[in-house]
């Protein structure tokens, strides 16, 4: 009986040619695994293509609910945005996909797991760190780090030679990753930084600003302990909320990011990301935190958010630090409950109103008028003590300056 390899399979360019390549270079039975994280693929077509390409068996794993509840919503509670721009749509999905690959490897008694990640990208690290954490005995086959294929153009030529249909051409050679949260675009013309990205050619989840609605729209999002539970007063599942906000974000041209990011492997890379629904949720959630968290907690969590985003981006979802930060973040979310109303218009999200029974804002105290808890006169003593260190420093500096003049 042959040994088995479990292949992370999408039916895209890379994984389409990996099946025949493995058959040519290894004596292994190939078990293809397509993990459905909401990429809206034709599952029957994917199954048919994998088997016709040479896979012995294929699994289609639907994990959309788990992805949104246990990964996307954690990212939102953390306000995790890599380098203040990228909401981590691809990075959040990788550890879950790796988890399913390991589960099926155990079920099939497979010794190997293969993936189509390039040797220059972040995803190879994300997959392999999670696989190592879950089962360090599994061996990895990473064709892009082994074969003679040097580019996506070479990969297309190989596919044509083998008679395998692929979803890209040399004219439209973008590398894309899609799930319920986002779609990414890399490669092709956007690798030249002199080129403005072609919105009409690229966008799959978002309208261009020119195509966005000319009429503003108000929406209300209700959060409970940092998690969105209702949209416009209607209680919905987490997946339904993301889907409906994706539609609204698309309608109003919200959620497009063009970023030159720092990859984990040491180079800079340009990516165009469309994240319509989650971009709206991140904006609403951040404003609710401003309303319900005290100054020290909010500002410290801003630092935590950057670190959390870097850990997820760098493939360290299973690390002790990331898990510890989850516990800290959950503690900060205890009072993050309430409603945020946003005005959506031409790529903009403008806060129209905020309301929470846990609000730390009190208009009677913050008003310029009189308040029992704070009198204008109280500021005298506060400023005197607050500025005391500066007065002491200034006094010492003046004395030192006089002494230096005398020495001269």
Image (spheres, rainbow, N blue to C red):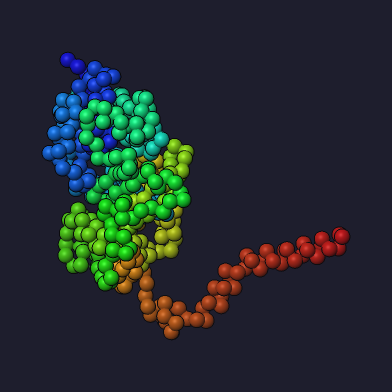
Q: Nearer the viewer, residue 131 or 204?
A: 204
Q: Extreme top residue here?
A: 1
Residue at (26, 23) in percent of width and height = 22
**Quadrant position of residue 231:** bottom left
Q: x and y percent of residue 370 in the render?
A: 43, 84
Q: Residue at x 31, y 68 (%)?
A: 345
Q: Residue at x 39, y 46 (%)?
A: 189
Against 84, residue 377 (above or below) is: below
Identify the residue shown where x is 36% and y is 50%.
272
Which of these two is toward me, 11 or 158?
Answer: 158
Residue 376 in picture, x, y percent from top left: 50, 81
Q: Answer above or below: position of 384 versus 290.
A: below
Residue 77 visible in image? no
Q: Position of residue 114 (x, y in %)?
A: 28, 28
Residue 394 is left or right of residue 76, and the answer is: right
Tell me: 238 left or right of 278: left
| Placement of 258 over or under 169, stated as above or below | below
**Could you tell me if residue 58 is visible in this image?**
yes
Position in image of residue 292 (x %, y %): 35, 65
- Can you say which quadrant of the picture contains the N terminus? top left
Using the rendered view, name the quadrant where residue 348 is placed: bottom left
The number of callouts visible is 0
Is residue 343 or residue 257 the one in the foreground? 257
């Amino acid at each position: 009986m042959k040994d088995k390899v479990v292949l992370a399979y999408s039916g895209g360019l890379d994984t389409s040619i990996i099946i025949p390549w493995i058959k040519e270079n290894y004596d292994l039975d190939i078990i293809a695994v397509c993990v459905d994280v909401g990429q809206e693929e034709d599952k029957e077509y994917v199954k048919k293509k994998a088997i016709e390409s040479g896979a012995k068996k294929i699994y289609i794993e639907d994990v959309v609910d788990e992805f949104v509840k246990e990964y996307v919503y954690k990212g939102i509670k953390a306000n995790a945005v890599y380098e203040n721009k990228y909401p981590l749509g691809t990075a959040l999905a990788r550890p879950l996909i790796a988890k399913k690959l390991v589960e099926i490897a155990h079920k099939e008694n497979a010794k190997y797991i293969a993936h189509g990640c390039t040797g220059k990208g972040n995803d190879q690290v994300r997959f392999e760190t999670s696989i190592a954490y879950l089962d360090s005995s599994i061996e990895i086959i990473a064709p892009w780090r082994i074969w003679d294929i040097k580019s996506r153009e070479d990969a297309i030529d190989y596919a044509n030679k083998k008679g395998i249909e692929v979803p890209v051409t040399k004219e439209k050679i973008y590398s894309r990753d899609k799930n319920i949260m986002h779609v990414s675009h890399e490669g092709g013309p956007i690798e030249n930084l002199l080129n403005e990205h072609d919105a009409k050619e690229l966008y799959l989840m978002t309208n261009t600003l020119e195509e966005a609605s000319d009429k503003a729209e108000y929406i209300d999002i209700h959060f409970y302990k940092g998690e969105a539970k209702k949209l416009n007063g209607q209680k919905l599942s987490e997946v339904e909320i993301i889907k409906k906000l994706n539609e609204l974000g698309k309608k109003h041209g919200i959620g497009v990011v063009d970023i030159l990011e720092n990859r984990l492997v040491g180079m800079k890379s340009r990516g165009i990301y469309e994240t319509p629904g989650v971009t709206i949720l991140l904006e609403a959630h951040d404003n609710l935190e401003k309303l319900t968290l005290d100054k020290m907690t909010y500002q410290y969590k801003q630092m935590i958010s950057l670190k959390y985003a870097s850990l997820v981006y760098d493939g360290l979802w299973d690390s002790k630090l990331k898990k510890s930060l989850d516990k800290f973040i959950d503690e900060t979310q205890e009072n993050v409950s309430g409603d945020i109303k946003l005005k959506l218009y031409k790529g903009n999200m403008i806060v129209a109103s905020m309301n929470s029974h846990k609000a730390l804002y009190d208009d009677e105290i913050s008003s310029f008028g009189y308040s029992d808890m704070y009198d204008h006169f109280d500021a005298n003593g506060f400023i005197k003590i607050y500025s005391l260190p500066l007065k002491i420093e200034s006094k010492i500096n003046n004395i030192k300056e006089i002494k230096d003049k005398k020495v001269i």
